[in-house]
Structure formats: C-alpha cells, structure tokens
Image (cartoon, grey):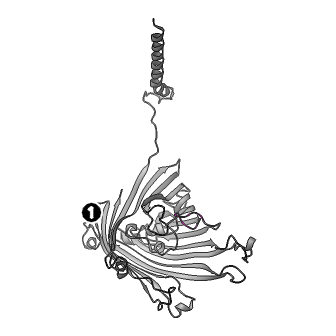
Amino acid sequence: MNTRFASALRRQRANAAVLAALAIMPALALAQQPQPQGSSAAPTVVTPSLDLSGVVFGSYTYRTDSAGKAAFGGTNPNQFTVDRAYINFRMPAGENGSIRITTEVFQNTNAAQNSYYQGWALRLKYAYAQYTGLKETFGTGSGVTGRFGILHTVVIDHQEQFWPRYLGQTAVERNGFFSSADGGAAALVTLGNKMGEVYTTITNGPGYSSYDKDRFKDYAARLTFTPFGSQSSLNPIIRSFAISPWIYKGQVGSSFAGGGAGQIGPGTNGAITDGMKRDRYGLFAGIRDRKISAGAEWAQRIDDGETGSNTAAAPRVVRDSTGRLVDAFIVARPLEWVNSSPSALSLIARFDRFTPNTSPSSANYAGTTPTINFVDLGGSWDLNQRITLALDWQKQSGTNYPAPVGTNVRAPADASSIVLHFQATF
C-alpha cells in the first residue's frame, strides 16, 4: 500500500474516532446522572426565570412662547424626540434573593456637555441585588428587603406610581431636589395587613448620572401609611389613599476641600473639610385607581452656599437658602365615573409652585420673593392596553421677580409648548 495513502487513511480514522467520541459524550454524561427510581427519563434542568419588561416614551414638542420664536427668527421651534427608553431585567438570585438591572436610553440636551456625543446613549438607571427576609413577621404580607447597588431614592419612584412619568418628571425631581436613583444601600420594610411601608436609604448623593464627588453620604427615610388598605368593604379609591412623610439629610463638600496657596481653612493647606448642608423633607399624599389618580405635596429644601475665596483678603462666607415647593396633580377618567364600561380617555391637570429662596438676602431682591410656576393641562387616549397618546399644554413662568438689575437679576423667560406624547410598555 502506498505510504502516503496509508498515512491519510490513518488520519481519517483518527478524526472519525474523535468525532464519534464527541457525539457520545452527552449521552455518557446523562448516563452517569442519578435517575429517578422507577423512571428512565432524563433529569430536569432548572433554569432561573428572567422577567423582561420595559417602557419607551417620547414626544413631539411645538414651542409657542415669544422667546422660543425669537431665537429662530420668529418661527416656532419644534422637534421629535425619544425622552426615555427603559429595559428592566429581573432574575432570581437564589432563595429569597433577586437582582434588577434597568438600562436607560436618553439624550444629552445640555449644549455645554454634549461635545463628545449628541445622540441617544445607553446608561444604567438601576442595578442592584436584594434579599428578602423576616416574612410575615409584622403581620400578613410583611417582610424586610435589603438592597445594594444603584437603587431608588427615597420618594420619586413612589410618586411615579401616581403621576405618569412619560408626561414629565415629578415636581421634586424637576426642581432639582435630588436624583431619582443613586448608588448606595437601602432597606424596605413592608408593613403587614396592607398598612404601608418604610423605605430608608444611604446614598452617595450626586445621583446615578454622576460619579461620587466627595466623602459625604446622604441619609433618607420615607414612611408610607395606607390606613384603609385592608378595609375591603370600602371603595377602592379610598383604600388606595396613602400619606407619605419623608426626610433627606445630606452634605456636599466645599469647593475649597482641597485647599491651596493662601487659603485659610482649618485643614491641611488651608482646606475646608466640613460638609455643607443639603437637607430636604416633605409630605406627599395621593390616591391611585384606574378612575382617578391624584396627589398633592409640600416640600422644602435647605442648602448651604459659599462666597469668597477662602483667603485673608476674601474670607469664605457660608449662606443658607431655603426653597419651598407646593404641587398637585390629577389624572382622571370622567366617563368611567358615570359608566362602568372602560374608557380610553383621561384628563390631566397639574400645577407646581416653586420658591427657590423663601428669604432672599440680596439687596437686589428687597421686597420680593420670586417663584417659578409650572402648569400642565391636557388629555390622553389609550390606543390599547399598552400604548397611550397624550396631548397637553405646558407653561413655565416666573412671578414676583424684581425689576431687572444689570445682567444678574432677571426673571426666567416664560416658556410654553404644545406637546404630543406617546408611551408604550411591554
């Protein structure tokens, strides 16, 4: 036999043997697994279930205010945009454990910060592990859940159960009290017999869209009390009533925390090592039902600010400022009040009144206390169980501002828009 032919035949036989071995390995592995007695069936492979859900919402905005038109030569600016797209991944992580990851698609509309990329980008909104224990300890349905990672802050997610997020941010978030998510740890205590919950957090402070900028941590707590939750004989709207006092105690680092030449702070190299106050607290109350969802809120914020250069010639001075927020909203289906049949139509109304500083100390503001008002009026229509369209008129305006003084004291220009929103959930 030709030597070259014999060598090739041996290689083919070897390859065939390897393929045959690979083909029978799964069967050999299954044969080694213990089988249920009295059955020849292969063992069941248990795969943890993945809960995938999400929401996408966007809008078409048509500006109607004179300032907006002036910036475009007397024509009305308008644009289509996808405001947010959230994808939620939830999955068990062993007994009583689970994880949640929520990605967020957003567009950076800050002209000073979008030099790198001006389109839509993807980032993490939530990413945490949680463990639930002490079930039924405090009554039927009770338990304690611990969370660690990028998680919900104290009250914004709670309010979004009453106010539709696709129409805009809640008043607390819109007026910059704090972010809706942040890195940290949290504990959720679910009270028994549908009486409510207690939610506490320790977070970095800057929010999920920023890195941690200082050594300080923020502490927050919310008590949600649902006094009629277990009263099955009452109307569902009354049973849904919830009242939620909350508090947020935080600090931020001084702009002179690193010290420097000529600085006179008490720390090394003249550094200011103490934190500056960043406190918030409020009271929210609401009802939530298909026929009507409504809420009202009072909230206050206290912030320390700095002036001067922390030098002997220009010493650092800390000034307190207190801001106040009052807001209310309603989303109602009036046709369902008189007819039990489901209605696709909802009416929307909201009013926010934010006072940035309740006691301005500058002489420029003598005798005035400026406020910023926001109004939202409109309606929505459910195309189906998952897709909703809404058309509303939104306006922001400043009131009680002093007469313009140079370029430092000016009321914000009125801004009004007609907005067509859409929301799709899956």
* Element type where label 1 sits in the image: loop
Question: In the shown orientation, is residue 187 left or right of residue 17?
Answer: right
Crowding at label 1, few (<14), some or many (≥20) Cα neighbours within 10 Å? few
* Residue 401, image x, y percentages: 47, 89
* Residue 305, image x, y percentages: 60, 79
Q: Give the quadrant of residue 393.
A: bottom left
Reading the image, the residue beneath label 1 is: 383
The front one of 365 and 141 is 365
- Residue 91 visible in the current orientation: yes
Q: Quadrant of the C terminus?
A: bottom left
Q: Residue at x 58, y 78 (%)?
A: 303
The front one of 412 and 182 is 412
Considering every residue shown, the one lying at the far bottom of the view is: 367
The front one of 9 and 338 is 9
Question: In the shown orientation, is residue 164 left or right of residue 305?
Answer: left
Q: Residue at x 57, y 82 (%)?
A: 321
The vertical placement of 5 against 174, above or below, is above
Question: In the shown orientation, is residue 357 left or right of residue 345?
Answer: right
By secondary structure, the bulk of the magenta-drawn segment is best described as: loop
The front one of 350 and 83 is 83
Q: Give the quadrant of residue 230.
A: bottom left
The vertical placement of 55 against 401, above or below, is above
* Residue 356, image x, y percentages: 51, 82
Q: Amino acid at mark 1?
A: Leu
Question: In the shown orientation, is residue 284 left or right of residue 133?
Answer: left
Residue 283 lies in the magenta-colored region: no
Q: Residue at x 40, y 67 (%)?
A: 165
Q: Which stretch is magenta? A: 205-212
Task: Count the labels in the image.
Answer: 1
Q: Quadrant of the N terminus?
A: top left
